Image (cartoon, rainbow, N blue to C red):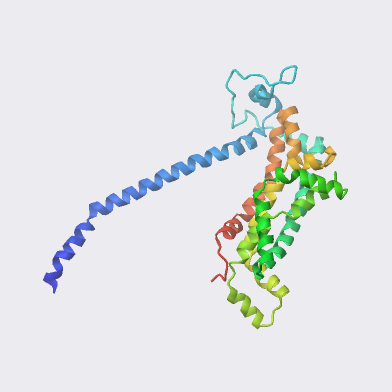
Amino acid sequence: MSKKNTPVRNVYQLNRSPKSAKRKKIWSVFKIAIATTIAAFFAIMFLMPIVLTITNSFMSASEISANYGSVFATTETGGKVYISEKVNLKFIPDMVSFSQYITVLFKSPEYLLKFWNSVILTGPIVLFQLIVASLASFGFARYTGRVRQIVFFVYIILMLMPYQVTLVPNYLVSEWFNILDTYWAIWLPGIFSPFAVYLLTKFMRRIPSSVIEAAQIDGAGEWQIYRKICMPLCKGALCSAAILIFIDYWNMVEQPLILLSDAEKYPLSVFLSKINAGEIGLAFAVATIYMVPSLLVFLYGEEYLVDGITYQGGIKG
């Protein structure tokens, strides 16, 4: 028996030679190094504007004007000036200065007012859109029928449409309800946005039916199934939806410009363009302050965001 198996064993040993294994290991390390280098390059390219904004916010107004004044310069008629020289991008200020933050936080309360306008507009949309979406998604996931399929299909069509397409109907409806130039004109379309409904419905459908049936056998009603089973299992999806909704509406521009005529109610996202055009030095500081909530929300909910996207539903072991 051992003599018959000897040739086969020798062939196997040849295929598993140390040189071949070493080549495969070197090639695997080389591929990982190339992929890491490419990923690091794109990561640096994406992070450069953020790093540039944060570091330049600690420059003095004179230094910012000396480095970037030609970019924002205009002619007497209001047109842009042709830049014949290269712009001097500086990541490290010559002297660290907090004058821009002192002006924004203490000397000019209008910037903080716009910041709180952003909070007032975004907070209720995130909270109530999740409430409405979770209830609607539970209905779409639990019950079947032709009417449900038609309504859900309409939700998908509305989600595929960009906001600019529905902006005119929203304006007409807001005018009919007499809520133009009020926060309700921004809140109501945002609260009933279809994105979270679609995301949570797809997630709830992955919950095993055996879990729901076991709860029904134990005497649980629909409200108990929703509150004690679906919501805990959808925690990751809810956090993912909350992060995406917050970032989307925190950066909104078209809705306030069209639905709000009072500039005092504009969020900071709209006001940033005016700062960039008028006071270059304050633009970096205000932009840095404006980025803080989005960065904090993302960093705090990063684990939930990944879990909500990758988790397929069911009971975790």
Q: Residue 96: x and y, percent?
A: 66, 32
Give the residue displayed 65% in from the left and 79% down from the top: 215
Would residue 185 be found to the left or right of residue 296 on screen?
right
The answer to whether residue 229 is above or below residue 125 is below
Compare residues 297 and 172 and report the one nearer the observer.
Answer: 172
Please tell me in which quadrant of the rendered image residue 234 appears: bottom right
Q: Which quarter of the figure has residue 76?
A: top right
The location of residue 53, given as percent across then percent down, is: 64, 35
Compared with residue 155, is residue 172 higher up or lower down, i.e. above or below? above
Image quadrant containing the N terminus:
bottom left
Can residue 21 be seen here? The reply is yes
Number of marks in the image?
Answer: 0
Q: From the viewer's perspective, is residue 46 above or below residue 127?
A: above
From the viewer's side, name the closer residue of 183 and 23: 183
Q: Hey, which residue is sitting farthest right in the picture?
A: 178
Q: Is residue 251 visible?
A: no
Could you tell me which residue is drawn at 66 percent across and 70 percent down? 142
- Report x, y in % for residue 152: 67, 60
